[in-house]
Each structure stands twice: as structure tokens, then as C-alpha cells.
Amino acid sequence: MFIFEWLSKKVSYTFAVCFFTIFGGWMSAVFGYYLGTSFILSNYDELNALALKWLPLSVLIPTLLHYISFGLLTPMKIPAFLKPLRDINKAFNNGTLNTSLDNETLQNIYVQLSHFPLYNMIAASLFGAMCGFFLMGFGYYDMYTSGTLTVVKMKTGIKAITIGVLVVIILYGMTTYLLTEIISNQHRAFVYQELRRRNINIYPRGLIGLRIKFSFFIILMIITLLTFAAMMEQYRLYEGAQYVNIITYMVISIIAGIFVMYINSDSVMRVLVEMGVVTKNIASGQNAWFKVMSHEEEFAEIEYSILEMAKQIEEHRKNLELKVEQRTEELREALASLKEKDDMIQKQLEIASNIQRSILPGRIDDWNELKFSVRYIAMEKIGGDFYDVYQIKGDKLGVLVADVSGHGIPAALITSMAKISFSSATQQYDSPKRVFQEVNQNILEHIKTQDYMTAFFVVIDDDYNIVYANASHQKAILVRSDEGRVEFLDTNGLFIGAIEEARETYEEKVTKLRYGDRLLLYTDGIPETANVDREEYSIERFQDVALKNRHLPLEDFTSFIIEDVQRFKGKAPVEDDITLLVIELARDEAVDIIKQSKKLIDEHKYYEAIDYLERSLTLYPNNRKLIYNLAKNYFRVNNFGKASELIEQYLEMDKRNKYAYYVGGAAYYQMMNYDKAIQLLERAQSIDPNFTNALFALGMAYKKMGMFQDALQIFERVANIDPDNKMALFEINEIRKK
């Protein structure tokens, strides 16, 4: 409490305790007065009045002496009278324990605190007896000076005071003990815990038992009843006896009894509650620290046993923790080894993922009036979906969307093999059916696996006729914009890479794109996406979303479909790769102009073609297709300066066209600006690492710069990609000769 803490800091610890225990002295004085005066005959009311007159002073003086002996004058450099009290005050300087004390001193402080209630009880008994002597002296002085002193009065007063003193000694002593115990208990517990932190065990001694405490309560009841009986007898025999005194005494007795019973039971209950808390802490693995400790020898022994048990448990726990740490360290080493291997696998997967992603065109450039939009979402680092576009002989464009069964590295191997195989097949055939047959055979011959691949392949000519074939893939969706309807494109055909007999199952069909139409090629990750209720997105919902949103700009259209799939999925896990490739036929005035210029070029009328494109460019000054084609024509007539100028203009509009970087790099190479040539050609091969024309030109630029080792590496890359490239093989031999 605040007052106790303040007194401890400003005066002394022992005085702060003593200050609150003096309540027992005043209570005892009241009981002593009533019991003593109950034996005085009614015709001696003057003795009763005399006792009331001098009782406060007789109590006040011993109380003051009690305070002084316990350190009231410590701030005035007059310490407590007893050495144990002085030791306690030094240990609790400023109200808190000095934890820097050595072990021996701390043990001594614990013993002194254990005996502190006894010290205070003895002092209380002594000063209680002193109270009787003071009352006797003041009474004798008063009667002597007033001339009322008689032998009878003297004997009667001595008898009454003696009885009262005995009561005071008993009650004052015991209440002081109880109050001191309650107040100092927490601090004794704190000292004890500090000793245990230092691994010092001290058995509590010098404590009283529960029987003595409860005997005090019985004594109080006996004194109360005895006094009440005497007062009732006095009331019965003598008219002078006052009924009011009896009532007052009974009220005081009830209050005192309740108070003594409360502090007696509280001292026990607090210990029992604390034992319960400590045992729960032990059970939960926490430290066994008593905030309150008992002054009863029975409970103190239990506390000591609990602490010893906790100590043994802690030792067993430490041994167990040591074993656990050893096993944990072994597991940690094993996990570290596994992590190292996993990191290596993850790095390899990351490399494989980068390789796989590099073979996927990040963006597909416009082709004539065809525009493309692609979204690809891999389930894992390495997915089984892939897509690609191919320049096919006869000025045609091939577009592929495929899905390899499974995921991870096996799927990546098939994907890489399929990429190479499709690229090779499209150089030979412009028929989707023949392409499928060739790829199926290549995969069966070179990859021995149970995995297979589905694919949808379309070939588009410059009149936008479509020839398509399906190898067990999802049906393509053709959204007719002007008619507001959907067509499904599908053919027969088994999986690619499953069986050789699949080549006989492939077939192809033909349709035609009209302006505004959109062709959707996709993998099963879209219609088979499931939500948390295991409901699938479905092909029906897919086509409805595509049809309702067909008037959105192309990129917005593609994004809306993917976002709708994600919204439908919600918090459900991703279970498959998702690929969506949308082809749109959008009218472009530049396309007809470019077609007309190509006719002039076919007739070797290069300058007429240039003049035609220049005039067209005045009508459409920001049309990047016209700028790009004009640059190529200037390159044809060896006007490399004009070609490079137009390419630079084009690249400000489109930085993803690998062919533009190639044309620009070749132009700078011809102008012997090799640094600039290398810059553009490196950009071309970064977009497509397998772009052999750009790679070869880059190697030549390195060679011209005298960077023969770099040139050799580039030419070797070209030869690895295209083993039949005779120019690359020639340059390799030439450099190696040097």
C-alpha cells in the first residue's frame, strides 16, 4: 500500500511494519480496560473514571516507545534498538531489497525476517505491560494529589490493572504477531526467492504452528465471554452498573473477533492460494516462485517440499532439454543438408523455369491485320502449358496452344522437345495435320515417357482463311462479332506423343475470319477451374463471358476473362496451368498499303515501293507498320542511314519487335557502327535467344570489333540451334585457325 511504501522509504522498514501493528495495542487496551473494570465494585465508579482519564496517555507513551525502538528516529540517525531490526532496515534501504548483498548476509536477513513477527510480539507484550505500570502510576499520583487515596482503592486498582495488563499482553502480543506476519510475508518470500536464484536452499525454522494461532482466537473468545459474564453479574447485583457499557463492549468484541478471525484465516488462505498457484506453474513448466510464504511451521514444511520438488523437476527438465537439444541439433543438421539439396533443386527448377519461359513469346507482334493477346498463369514454377507462333512458307502464320500432361521437369522436357519439333515441322509443312504427324513421331522417337500432349494448331493465310486441327485439346471458340454468336472449332485427333497410330487420326478443317472476329485458343485450366464448392467454371460460362464482353478492347477483353476465372475460383487452390490466347482480326488501312508495296517489290520496283510508302506515311504519320516496312525497303536499296533512322523511330513505338532490332542492327553494321549494331542485335536475341539471323549478325559484329572469343561463342550457339548453318560453321573454322 502507498502509506507503507512511503514510511519504508522515508523512515525505516521495521517502523513501517510496526506502525500498522499498533492497532492491536489499542484493541488490547480496550479489552483490558473492560475486563479489569468489570471486577471493580459499583461503589468505586471513581476508579473507573480515573482509569478512563489516564488510559489514553498510558497507551500513547508505550506506543511511542515501541515506535522509537523499531526505528522511528532512523532519519535522525537514531536507529532501531535491536541489531536484527537494524540489519533488516539496511537490507531494505529505501523500501526495496538490496539484491547486491552477499549470500551470507542475505541468509541472515531471511532468518531475521522469519523471526521478525516474534520480535514484534515480544516488544508488544513488553510495552503492553509497561502500559499497566504507567496507568497504575498515573492513578496513584492522581489519588495522592487529590487526597482520595485509600488502601481499599489501592488494592482494588492494582487488581483491576493486573487483570487488564494480562489481557493486553496476550491480545497485543498475538495480534501484533499476526499483523507483522501478513505485512512482512511478501518481503520474506522475495528474499527467499533471491536465495533460490543463487541456488541456496534454506530450511525455514523458528516458526509457530497453526494450533497456537487458533488458540489465540479461542483465548480471545474466552476473555470476551468472561468479561461479559462479569459485567452481567455486576449489572445484576449493583444499581450503579451501566447497561450502556455492556452494549458498547459487545459491539467492540464482535468487531475485534471478526478482525482477528479475518487476519488469522487470511494468513492461512493466502498461503493455500499461493500453493495452488505455484503447483499449477510447476505443472505448466513455469518457475516455482512463492509470492507469499507461510509463518506456520506445518505449511512452511510443505512449501519447502514443493520447492525441492520443483528443483528436481527443473533438473529433470534441463536434462530432458539437453537431450532434446542434442536431438534437435541432429535434426537441424539433417534439415540443413536437406535444405541444401532442396535449394539446389529449387535453383535447377528456377533455371528450368526461366528456360521454359524464354521459349514462350512474351508478346506476339501484329501480323497484317491480326492482333494478339496472351495470358499465361503457371500452377508451379514449371508448367505444362505452352504456346507459340510460326512464320510458315507461303506468307502464312501458324499459331499453337498446347498442354502437356503433368507438371514439373518431365512436362518441361516434353515442352522443350515439342517447341523444337513444332518449329522444325512448320518449316516443312503448312498443313496442321502434317505438322501434328511429324511432331507425334519426333516425340515418340526421342522421349520415352508416359506423358502426352494435347494441342490446337491453326494456320492463317494473308486472306485470313484458317486451316485448323485439334489433337484432343479444348475446342477453339470463334466469337463472331457482327452476328453476336459463338462457333466451336474442333476436329478428330488423338493425343500427341501417346501412340504412333495417332498419326492416322488427325484431320483438319477450314473456316474464315471476318473483321471484328475473335478466335480464343486456351487450355483446360480455364473451363476446369473449380471453386471452394468444387463447381467448375465450365465451357458454357466461358463462352457466355466471351460473347457478352466481345466489344471490349482486346487487352481488356482478355484480362476480363482471366479475372472472371479468378473471381469464380475464390480461395480455392490453383490446380492447373491457365493459358488464353486471343486472335482478333481488326481492320488496318496500312495493311492494304503494305500489300500493294510488296507487289511492287516482287516486280523489283523498289524505289516505286518506297515512294508509295512515303506518300502513304504522310496520310498515316504514326503508323508503325508503315514505318517498319519503309525501313526494310530502304535497307534493300542500301540506304542504311535512312533505314536506321526509321528503325529508331519505330522502336520508340514498339520495343518488343525482334525483327526491327535485327534490321536496325544490320543497318548499323553496314555503316560500320559496330557498337550500335551490337546494342540492337543483343536486344533482338534477348527477346528470342534462338533468333539465328540476329545471332549470326551479332557474331559478325563481334568479329569486326576484334572480339574473337565472343564471336566464337555466338557462332557456336548458332551452330547448336541450326547444325546445317554453313555460314556459322565457316566462321567457327576461320576463328579457330587464328
Image (cartoon, rainbow, N blue to C red):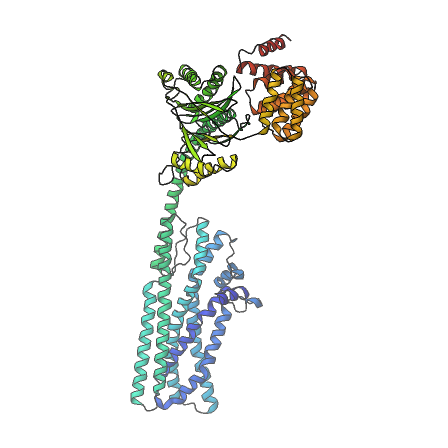
Image quadrant assignment for residue 703: top right
Residue 533, image x, y percentages: 35, 41
Q: Residue at x 68, y 25 (%)?
A: 645
Q: Residue at x 31, y 90 (%)?
A: 238
Residue 664, image x, y percentages: 65, 22
Residue 93 seen by the camera: yes
Q: Is residue 315 above or below residue 2?
A: above
Image quadrant assignment for residue 474: top left
Which one is in front, 510 or 150? 510
Q: Is residue 699 above or below residue 322?
A: above
Residue 677 seen by the camera: no
Q: Quadrant of the C terminus?
A: top right
Give the total of numbered labels. Answer: 0
Q: Is residue 420 above or below residue 223?
A: above
Q: Is residue 562 above or below residue 33?
A: above
Horizontally, is 355 left or right of 608 in the view? left
Image quadrant assignment for residue 257: bottom left
Residue 585, image x, y percentages: 51, 29
Residue 513, image x, y percentages: 48, 27
